[in-house]
Image: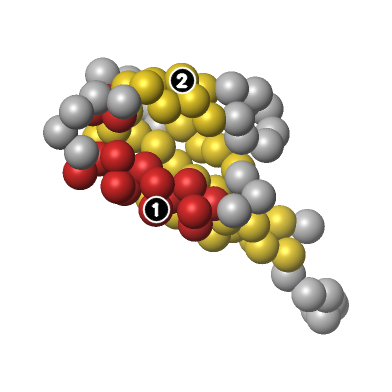
Amino acid sequence: MVQQFNQPQKTRTALILFLKGSATPVVMYFDNPQAVYAELKQLMKSPTPVLVEKEPIGPIKKLCFVSTQIASVILQEETYA
């Protein structure tokens, strides 16, 4: 018989960045991922290239890229234990 546990699920939001010319997306975690998402969406609309430097939480310590290289950016909510 399967025993069910009524433990609350923890969730976190990951920001996933797709860069032109890169085969795999970059997954980053921030304290406020919605603000970073809004900033990157705004940079995607700008026709002038801007050097972007981000310091996410987790295994990636620092990431630099040019704003014109952003193909797409998404937010993904994940559950974890």
Residue 63 position, x and y percent, is 51, 23
Residues packed near mark 2 inside 10 Å, few (<14), some (14 to 19) or many (20 plus): few
Give the answer, above or below, for where 19 lies relative to 36: above
Marks 2 & 1, CB-CB < 8 Å contact: no
Kind of residue at badge 1: Ala
Crowd band around label 1 with a 10 angstrom C-alpha radius: few (<14), some (14–19), many (20+): few
Q: Amino acid at mark 2?
A: Cys
Name the residue located 25 percent from the left edge and 40 percent from the top edge: 44
Residue beneath disc 2: 64
Residue 28 at x, y percent in the picture: 55, 38
Which residue is pictured at 20% across the width and 38% down the height?
Answer: 46
Question: Which residue is at 65% across, 24% downward?
Answer: 61
> Along the horizontal axis of the image, is 32 left or right of 16?
right
Taking the image as drawn, is residue 23 in sight?
no
Q: Which residue is mark 1?
A: 38
Quarter holding the N terminus is bottom right
Residue 69 horizontal side relative to residue 51, left or right: left
**Residue 78 in the image: x percent, y percent?**
59, 57
Element class at badge 1: helix
Image point 20% across, 44% down: which residue? 45
